[in-house]
Image: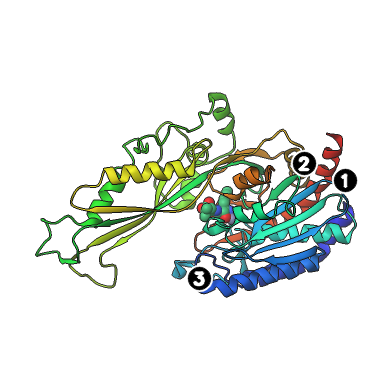
């Protein structure tokens, strides 16, 4: 392992330069205008994999954006690890809130990252994180220190729901066959408190359209007599949560996993400062479901949030109009045993039932994904634990997280394989927000930790 660590130390500047190059391409999967950039990024990932030493590298087309595959098969008897990551990124909007352009990466020091952090869209989510695996792989290969087979599967549609990945996995079951899936697309508690993600929430995403009069009206001539769809929509949305921030959709909580008091007490032992949380977000107070802590509200409890709402006049100045239509995008984060299709349907039935006769509503479905909990009594979890303990000098804490990676449940369903979620980002790294960044400490710590994972995994598999 010494040689591997020395190799990483000697090549760390080049590793960073390569990442910065990749961060310059706007691989925004949600916007068709960036289709070519998404493809260009896929080609670059393929080149980087080849250069690191991977064989059989392919940019594999799907109905959507391509998936980059590469592998190193060292022997039939060895355990096989499939590394999953995504090279697509979220749209950078709102652009004017970025302190430097989102696709011109710069390194700046921050309070939390005194050694510097890379500021760019995708720096943490997930280019910076999956790239740690490519570089750790290079370091292991160059030093003859890899004792497992590795397969890489880096996709380009994670940020839009991985719609084509299920079919891809079903069609390529043999190619993707593996013993475990290793993913770095999550967070640690802090740079001094490592953690391993043991659960992710699912997601149900819907869009609603509320239609009032057949055309935009003069708000003086008709206002007061005709229902305003924006007002109606706001009222309907407000009614989806009661005064205890409990979601009012009938049946919404029916399948929610009940977590024991002991387990909740254990979860709440993880270090968390409410004052720092509020300060970081510049909020006077927090809010959320009554009876649960902030940690629980963002991990083991389901939520409902409006992601966008629009209608009427939103241009410069004022226009007195009673709009014909109003829209909203609404997402619900789901916890174990809830099902994304069932929840979407419950939402639609309820939303239609509460609409007044003065408007018509239409609910359409976007993507969904199922929640997951990963086991902690497996050789792979143990390997991740030992690896982090080695490089952080501290035992990592198991922690459920609030974000979603729909492919994790799919991998379990289609390939029958569990994942290890060993991420290195911080929740405060502004994922999906302006000024996304990734600490250099985190980037290098990840590259150093990954070889230890393989080292321990190979050994523990042999023993088990
Ligand atoms: N990397 C995130 C998920 C994440 C972030 C998990 C932080 C845990 C901690 C991922 O890229 C993501 O944003 N996923 C989407 C999924 C959706 C588009 C289906 C999400 O959670 O909104
Ligand atoms: Zn991600």
Q: Earlier in the sequence, mark 3 or mark 2?
A: 3
Which residue is tagged 2? 383
Q: Which residue is mark 1?
A: 77
- Rendered image quadrant of residue 291: top left
Residue found 38% across the figure and 41% down from its top: 346
Q: CA distance from mark 3 to mark 1?
A: 44 Å
Q: Position of residue 340 (x, y in %)?
A: 48, 44
Q: Is residue 339 left or right of residue 415?
A: left
Helix, strand or loop at mark 2 = helix
The residue wearing badge 3 is 32
Q: Residue at x 58, y 33 (%)?
A: 267
Q: Quadrant of residue 129?
A: bottom right
Measure the alpha-carbon separation of dots 2 and 1. 19 Å
Q: Position of residue 451 (x, y in %)?
A: 80, 51
Image-quadrant location for residue 56: bottom right
Of the image marks 3 and 1, the number of the one nearer the N terminus? 3
What residue sits 62% from the left and 57% below the top? 113
| Residue 197, position as x, y percentages in the image | 63, 43
Query: Tag 1 or tag 2, which sits nearer the N-term?
Result: 1
User: Are dots 3 and 1 in contact, CB under 8 Å?
Assistant: no
């Amino acid at each position: 392992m010494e040689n591997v660590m020395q190799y990483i130390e000697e090549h760390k500047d080049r590793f960073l330069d390569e990442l910065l190059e990749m961060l310059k391409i706007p691989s925004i999967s949600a916007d068709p205008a960036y289709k070519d950039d998404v493809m260009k990024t896929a080609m670059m990932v393929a080149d980087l994999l080849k250069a690191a030493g991977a064989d059989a590298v392919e940019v594999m087309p799907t109905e959507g954006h391509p998936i980059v595959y590469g592998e190193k098969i060292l022997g039939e008897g060895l355990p096989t690890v499939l590394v999953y990551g995504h090279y697509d990124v979220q749209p950078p909007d709102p652009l004017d809130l970025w302190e430097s352009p989102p696709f011109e990466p710069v390194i700046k020091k921050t309070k939390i990252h005194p050694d510097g952090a890379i500021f760019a869209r995708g720096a943490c989510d997930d280019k910076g994180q999956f790239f740690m695996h490519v570089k750790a792989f290079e370091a292991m290969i160059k030093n003859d220190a890899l004792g497992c087979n590795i397969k890489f599967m880096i996709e380009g549609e994670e940020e839009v729901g991985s719609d084509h990945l299920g079919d891809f996995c079903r069609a390529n079951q043999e190619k993707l066959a593996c013993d475990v899936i290793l993913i770095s697309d999550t967070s640690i508690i802090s740079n001094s408190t490592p953690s391993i993600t043991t659960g992710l929430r699912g997601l149900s995403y819907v869009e609603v359209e509320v239609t009032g009069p057949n055309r935009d009206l003069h708000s003086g001539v008709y206002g007061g007599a005709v229902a305003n769809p924006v007002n109606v929509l706001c009222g309907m949305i407000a009614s989806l949560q009661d005064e205890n921030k409990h979601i009012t959709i009938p049946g919404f909580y029916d399948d929610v996993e009940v977590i024991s008091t002991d387990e909740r007490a254990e979860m709440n032992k993880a270090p968390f400062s409410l004052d720092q949380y509020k300060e970081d977000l510049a909020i006077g107070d927090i809010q959320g479901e009554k009876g649960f802590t902030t940690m629980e509200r963002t991990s083991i409890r389901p939520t409902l949030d409006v992601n966008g709402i629009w209608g009427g006049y939103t241009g410069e100045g004022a226009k007195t109009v009673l709009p014909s239509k109003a829209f909203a995008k609404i997402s619900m984060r789901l916890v174990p045993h809830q099902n994304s299709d069932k929840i979407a349907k419950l939402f639609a039935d309820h939303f239609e039932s509460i609409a007044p006769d003065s408007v018509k509503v239409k609910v359409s479905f976007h993507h969904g994904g199922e929640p997951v909990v990963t086991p902690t009594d497996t050789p792979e979890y143990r390997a991740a634990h030992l690896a982090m303990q080695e490089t952080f000098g501290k035992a990592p804490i198991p922690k459920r997280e609030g974000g979603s990676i729909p492919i994790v449940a799919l991998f379990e369903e289609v390939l029958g394989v569990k994942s290890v979620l060993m991420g290195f980002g911080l929740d405060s790294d502004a994922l999906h927000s302006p000024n996304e960044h990734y600490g250099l400490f985190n980037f290098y710590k990840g590259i150093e930790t990954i070889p230890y994972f393989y080292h321990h995994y190979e050994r523990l598999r042999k023993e088990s």
